[in-house]
Image (cartoon, grey):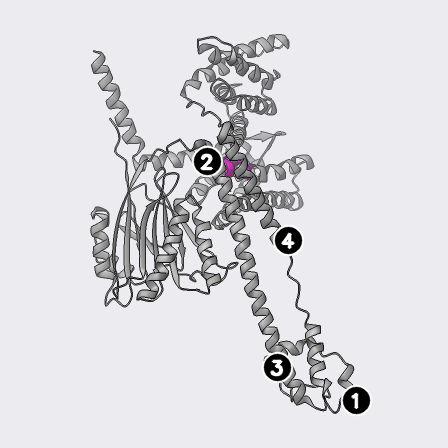
Amino acid sequence: MMTTIETYVRRSSGRLRKLAVNPRLRLTGKTALYFSAGLVLSAASLAHSAQPLALGLLFALTGWQGLVAALGGAAGYLLFWGKAGFQGLVWLGLGLPAALMVNRRKDEERAHILLAGAVAGLLVSAVGLGFQIFLKDRTAVPVYLLRVGLAPLSAWLFLMIRARKDPVADWLGAGVLVLSLAQLSLGPKLSLGFPAAGMLTAGGVFPVAALAGLALDLAQLTQVPMTAVLCLAWLCRLIPWKSKMLGIVAPGGVYLLVMGLCGLTDPLPAVLLAVGGGLAVLLPPQPELHHRRGETGLAQVRLELMAGVMSQTQQLLLEEATAPIDESALLARTQERACGGCPCRKGCRERLTPLPTNLLHKPLVDQFSLNLGCKKPARLVLELRRSQEQLRTIKADRDRREEYRWAVIQQYQFLAHYLQLQSDELPRRGETLKKKFEAQIGISAIGREEANGDRCLRFPGTGGRQYLLICDGMGTGLGAAQEGQTAAAMLRQMLSAGFPAEYALRSVNSLLVLRGRSASVTMDLAELRLDTGRVWLYKWGAAPSWLVRDGIPEKIGTAGPPPGLSVQDGRESVERLSLGRGEVLILTSDGVDGEAALRHVSDISAVPPGELADRLLELGCGELQDDATVAVVRLHPCALST
């Protein structure tokens, strides 16, 4: 009998796992989750007025996820607030395109968070002001200021929660969830905030319990001080008693105790808290915080100090201003050389008159274009041409030095961020990330000459990442092959060491600029996240790629300027894709006509990646005018253990 039950449980668990990795079910679940998140956050109330928490969530999402959350928030503002929720509809209506534009920018993480918060706050303040001026809105000034302050704070909070880097953000997010659920009820005084608070108190950490109690106090659901209740209930878990029931019943029991001490009669929340305490068994176990101990803590401190030094050095270089060119002194020397040996210098009226600075910027200077009354204009024209050439040389030298300066600033910035990442990940160095997908990659390449200028590499990275890189050396032959191999080897070393992809690409760009090797290579990099099935596709001058979904190819990216043109202005493009539902990603070099090749291939999803790469290369390279490379990527769910 026990064997039969065990077998039944194992089979049922296997079926549930298969359902969990089903692409359509996962998509449906994610859609419902984002819609519900926007719906619940729109119910949050402070000072008996709607708050822009759903707008903050919108700035933390991208693409269809943001659209679904916006629809959920819009439905919530109409459902919970009626006419008072029209302002929330305007927040979301204007916030959706603003969030999409902000999230498409490839700024540094800190700059991105600041920009998202600033845009959210500006949007809420402008909409509130417009409602007050044109619609005679009666919102009080403190409520208006509260909304303006909550918009950037909520955007920061949800961006930090999505990044999963700060446990404090997760704690604050739990408090916001309780505050939002407090406004939802299944009946009179049956607020969902109480079960949620009881669950977090019985199964969470102390800050979560305190923030949940504070959220209930702000919602003003009961006169019993809920912050004190939930803090005391969590402390009851520290009593050395073997039974786990103490932590489960503590929220409801402590509530009754505090209610009696306050002389109040409101027992219904105790029942809801007890229900939430019982539901705490559904919560996953809380991960232990990594404390700095011994050599690990010392190494963390050293890495953070070094990151701080790098950031400070970067800031000092940014604050260093470049001295302007003294064009007046250059013209004075020009006039001195022209008039110093002139036989007419004593009687020339223009001898002591300063020359206008615009003379240095005229493209052509001749004696007829000068209107200065000079008696010997040929001498002055000759010296002006020399000064113009000298000015161009000075500007070229300054531009070159400015490129060096910005390259150094970038490297200090990249190293500071990299050292901070290493410090954050040091306590988790022994943890292994569970991979949900396996990468199936097929590569096919052919060179016009013996030395192939296309360098294609596949290699693992850190944190469950895998990389596929195509470095196309411009042109053909040995020179193109050397350029592609040098850039690819440098990128591989940095990415394998955990350097962020965008920093690695910009470092190679800086190197090409300083070496004077502009437009010598193009870079096409796919970063595969094997734990989520997501793909970050970075392009810098590379040919467009193709994403095949349900047999329909879609062009990804456009050919842009190659790297090596400028340190400041040059930038990679990035596309975020998903291969978790059987999609196929095809990368090609510029020697392959991918669009023409895909027309002659049917049932792409059923063809193995290696065979598909060979067929596309054969159909797309034509007369082989350039080196040609095709790489095909498909993610397959890992086999489930039974």
Q: Is any atom of residue 357 visible in this view?
A: yes
| Along the line of sight, the residue nearer the viewer: 506 or 1 | 506
Residue drawn at x 28%, y 35% is 638
Above or below, 449 against 459 in this view is below
- Could you say where residue 442 lies in the image, as x and y percent from the top left? 25, 50
Question: Residue beneath label 2, please?
Answer: 425
Residue drawn at x 31%, y 66% is 476
Question: Residue beneath label 3, please?
Answer: 385
In the rendered image, which quarter contains the C terminus?
Answer: top left
- Could you say where residue 63 lies in the image, as x and y percent from the top left? 43, 45
Is the stretch drawn in magenta largely helix, strand or loop?
helix
User: Over which residues does the magenta segment extend?
Assistant: 154-165
Mark closest to the chain's N terminus, 2 or 3: 3
Mark closest to the chain's N terminus, 3 or 1: 1
Mark closest to the chain's N terminus, 3 or 4: 4
The Cα–Cα distance between marks 3 and 4, rounded to whole angstroms, is 35 Å
| Along the line of sight, the residue nearer the viewer: 564 or 62 | 564
**Three-letter amino acid code at the position of disc 3:** Arg
- Could you say where residue 7 lies in the image, as x and y percent from the top left? 22, 19
